[in-house]
């Protein structure tokens, strides 16, 4: 019973390196179904004891397991083929090792004593488990990176193919029993395997890049939507104040006509406060930047955070307004979030300067030593705020660079964007 469970976990982890998991019936019930399928397959193998039927059962088990993952059918088939190749190589390495250890030919491996066959199965399973853990940990480590070098992760499989071919060839030369037909078939088979792997790796890399791009675009759309909602609320407030001015002035006129000067003064002060609160400050002639700064200024005031804006940029830039807005808004949102957690004097400094057909943005804010600025502390890192990937993507788009550092209780970010002739 324990071996089918281990086999299911190992296969599941291997496939999860390439496909996103999908809950079908519930986490616990899903695992019970997979373990049950594996146990039925084990019983079938013992009952039929036929190599071809055993292979068919293994393939059926694998494709049932693949149904518990998301993705297109083509990608699932490629992932399944990759696992079969992986299992074949593991068994091939074990077969070569046992042939040397027990001085037997690889072609006679299936006719050996049961103890040798069981030993081979055990070693093959252990190799698959160790390699799967390695792949899984490596894929987890790189899951949040902007790029995934899939070829770099799995070059071990073509390398194992070459090693297996060399060992088998040397084994035949050592025994002076060269089987040309077997050698040619083995070379062709390994060649086909590596071609399939190359195609798979390339498609997998393209998929991950597209997935990262879509995720960043979704974040930008969410951010733009939030920005436009804030802007609309601001405009509604201005329209409300304008609509009420007539009534306010009528009331003030009534107070003055009746000689109630103090009441009239109070109404005028209230009206001036409302107009001042709704009035946009002018930090720059650039409408996008000025709009973002005014929106974030309201959040700073609510968070009781002081600010210092020093903006020196032209009215028009060859940088898309959405990109500049997302980048600037992201930096300020992270700075405001850090200030909200900081116990002490809160002040955000923002410098923007136009130099040599480029824009330099420098933002700094106080922070705690353990503040994870630019990376949310919440578990839902994908949907909460923007991280380094989004900033890096915008910087890359304009052939710029960026850097950040946390020192002496200050978090500093510097971004450089070059204007694009395509804008």
Image (cartoon, rainbow, N blue to C red):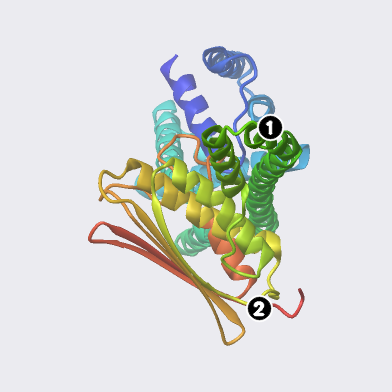
Q: Residues within 10 Å of mark 1 (few under 14, many from 20)?
A: some
The picture places residue 362, in percent across and down from the top left corner, at 45, 69
First in sequence, mark 2 or 1: give its number: 1
Residue at (63% x, 37% y) in the render: 256
Tell me the residue that label 2 is attached to. 419
Secondary structure category for the residue under label 2? loop
Give the label on residue 371, or none. none
147 up-or-down from 42: above or below? below
Residue 349 visible in the picture: yes
Tell me the residue that label 1 is attached to. 254
Residue 96 visible in the picture: no
Labels 2, 1: front one: 1
The quarter of the picture where residue 179 lies is: bottom right
Secondary structure category for the residue under label 1? helix
Total labels: the figure holds: 2
The quarter in which the N terminus is drawn is top left
The picture places residue 229, in percent across and down from the top left corner, at 69, 41
Real-space Cα separation, disc 2 to disc 1, in angstroms: 57 Å
274 up-or-down from 202: above or below? above
374 up-or-down from 260: above or below? below
Closer to the camera in the image, 59 or 414: 414
Instruction: Give left or right: position of 38 versus 135.
Output: right
């Amino acid at each position: 019973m324990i071996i089918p469970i281990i086999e299911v976990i190992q296969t599941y982890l291997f496939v999860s390196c390439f496909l996103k998991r999908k809950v079908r019936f519930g986490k616990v019930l899903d695992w019970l179904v997979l373990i049950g399928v594996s146990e039925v397959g084990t019983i079938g193998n013992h009952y039929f004891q036929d190599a071809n039927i055993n292979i068919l059962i293994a393939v059926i088990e694998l494709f049932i397991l693949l149904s518990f993952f998301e993705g297109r059918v083509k990608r699932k088939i490629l992932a399944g083929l990759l696992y079969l190749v992986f299992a074949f190589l593991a068994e091939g390495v074990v077969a070569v090792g046992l042939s040397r250890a027990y001085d037997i030919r690889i072609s006679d491996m299936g006719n050996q004593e049961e103890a040798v066959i069981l030993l081979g199965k055990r070693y093959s399973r252990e190799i698959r488990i160790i390699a799967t853990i390695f792949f899984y940990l490596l894929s987890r480590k790189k899951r949040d990176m902007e790029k995934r070098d899939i070829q770099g992760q799995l070059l071990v499989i073509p390398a194992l193919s070459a090693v297996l071919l060399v060992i088998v060839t040397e084994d035949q030369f050592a025994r002076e029993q060269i089987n040309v037909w077997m050698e040619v078939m083995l070379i062709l088979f390994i060649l086909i395997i590596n071609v399939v792997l190359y195609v798979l790796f390339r498609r997998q890399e393209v998929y991950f890049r597209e997935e990262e791009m879509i995720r960043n675009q979704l974040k930008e759309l969410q951010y733009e939507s939030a920005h436009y909602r804030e802007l609309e609320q601001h405009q509604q407030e201005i329209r409300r104040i304008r609509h009420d001015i007539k009534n306010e002035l009528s009331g003030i006129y009534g107070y003055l006509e009746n000689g109630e000067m103090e009441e009239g003064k109070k109404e005028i002060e209230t009206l001036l406060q409302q107009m001042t609160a709704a009035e946009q400050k002018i930090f720059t002639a650039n409408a996008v930047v000025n709009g973002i700064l005014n929106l974030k200024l309201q959040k700073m005031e609510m968070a009781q955070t002081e600010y210092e804006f020093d903006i020196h940029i032209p009215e028009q830039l060859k940088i898309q307004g959405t990109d500049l807005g997302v980048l600037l808004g992201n930096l300020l949102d992270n700075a405001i979030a850090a200030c909200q957690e900081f116990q002490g004097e809160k002040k955000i400094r923002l410098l923007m300067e136009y130099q040599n057909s480029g824009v330099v943005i420098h933002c700094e804010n106080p922070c705690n030593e353990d503040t994870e600025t630019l990376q949310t502390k919440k578990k839902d890192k994908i949907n909460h705020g923007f991280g380094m990937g989004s900033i890096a993507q915008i910087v890359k788009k304009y052939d710029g660079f960026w850097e950040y550092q946390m020192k002496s209780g200050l978090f500093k970010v510097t971004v450089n964007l070059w204007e694009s002739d395509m804008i």
